[in-house]
Amino acid sequence: MAVIGITGPSAAVQGSTAGVAVTIKNFGNQNVTSAFDVVLQDTTAHVTVGTQSVPSLAVGASATLTFAWTPTTTGNHTLVGSHGLGDDKAANNQRFTTIPVNPR
């Protein structure tokens, strides 16, 4: 299982909600039949934006989860998307993007 993408707006506005999408893909050789969580964190503001559960994911399949992010401070924010499924390739369990947040 890998986080293969995290996308959001080219810039956000303080106090306004923006959608941020986290895409995961099952690169393994077996279906994932148990639910697992995908988490989006704003590491700049030290907050968890949200947690969503994926019920299962077949071999080769991907899923995109959209999170509602409302930044409360301005400046560059680093957003990290990750999954909670333990596997032997921890290096691809998360991905990040940086989005500038402008004042209202």
Image (cartoon, grey):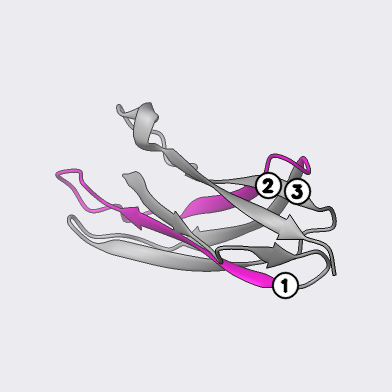
Distance CA(mark 3)–CA(mark 1): 16 Å
Q: Which residue is mark 2?
A: 77
Is residue 35 visible in the rendered image? The answer is no
- Image: 53 above or below 28: below
In the image, is residue 74 above or below residue 18?
above
Tell me if residue 32 comes above or below residue 28 in the rendering: below
Q: Are marks 3 and 1 in contact (CB under 8 Å)?
A: no
Residue 101 magenta: no
Residue 75: image tag: 3
Pointer 3 local density, CA inside 10 Å: few below 14, some 14–19, many at least 20: some
Q: 99 or 41, which lies in front?
A: 99
How would you rate the neighbour count of disc 1 (Cα within 10 Å): few for under 14, some for 14-19, many for 20 or more?
some
Residue lying farthest to the left in this orientation: 29
Q: Residue at x 53, y 69 (%)?
A: 66
Asked whether the residues under the numbered discs 3 and 2 touch, taking CB atoms below 8 Å apart as contact, a structural biologist would say: yes
State whether residue 9 appears in this view. Answer: yes
Residue occupying the point 63% across, 63% down: 11
In the picture of the structure, the residue carrying the numbered disc 1 is 17
Q: Give the residue displayed 23% in from the left and 60% down from the top.
A: 58
Foreground tag (3 vs 1): 3
- The amino acid type found where label 3 is placed reads Gly
102 or 82: nearer the eye?
102
- Residue 62 horizontal/vertical position (percent): 29, 62
For badge 1, the amino acid type reads Thr
Which element carries disc 3, helix, strand or loop? strand
Q: Earlier in the sequence, mark 3 or mark 1?
A: 1
